[in-house]
Image: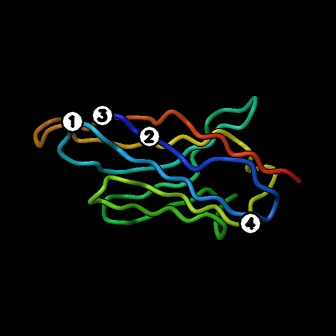
Amino acid sequence: VQLQASGGGLVQAGGSLRLSCAASGSFFSVLDMAWYAQAPGKQRELVATITRGGTTTYADSVKGRFTISRDNAENRVHLQMNSLRPEDTAVYYCYADVLLQFYSNARDYWGQGTEVTVSS
């Protein structure tokens, strides 16, 4: 299973970016998906999660600015980031909880990270 993230870049404060991540490979189903952010010198932190059924959660710092969504048919997760702030600067990683086979336990997978830089 591979997760391929894209969509990062350099943007001015107040701008927007849309991150996408696609899961590929051989598996039965993708369960929860999420985005994490790791700022320079800091630990990786949870930004947003979405269940297969579409239930979402957000870190307090991004509520009202970021929106997580997914396409179950294409095994993709997106993060729409609006009103970006310099403190949002980080490497963003997508995460997926993947059921490899119907009777197997789910396993965690991570994407390679995509860099977001917000200038003031």
* Discs 4, 3 touching: Cβ within 8 Å: no
Q: Nearer the viewer, mark 2 or mark 1?
A: 2
Q: Residues within 10 Å of mark 4 (few under 14, many from 20)?
A: some
Q: Nearer the viewer, mark 3 or mark 1?
A: 3
65 or 22: nearer the eye?
A: 22
Q: Residues within 10 Å of mark 1 (few under 14, many from 20)?
A: few
The residue shown at (64%, 61%) is: 81
Q: Which residue is mark 3?
A: 1
Q: Nearer the viewer, mark 2 or mark 3?
A: 2
Q: Which residue is mark 2?
A: 4
Q: Tell me the tag on residue 105.
A: 1
Q: Which residue is mark 4?
A: 83
Q: On the picture, is 111 further left or further right than 54?
A: right
Q: Residues within 10 Å of mark 2 (few under 14, many from 20)?
A: some
Marked residue nearer the N-terminal end (3 or 1): 3
> Which amino acid lies under the numbered mark 4 shown in the image of this protein?
Ser
Local secondary structure at mark 1: loop
Q: On the picture, is 63 further left or further right than 25?
A: right
Marked residue nearer the N-terminal end (2 or 1): 2
Q: Quadrant of residue 25?
A: top left
Separation of marks 2 and 1 at Cα, in angstroms: 22 Å
Separation of marks 4 and 3 at Cα, in angstroms: 33 Å
Residue 116, horizontal then vertical, whole percent: 69, 45
Residue 90, horizontal then vertical, whole percent: 70, 41
Separation of marks 4 and 1 at Cα, in angstroms: 38 Å
Give the quarter of the figure containing the N terminus. Answer: top left
Q: Nearer the viewer, mark 2 or mark 4?
A: 2
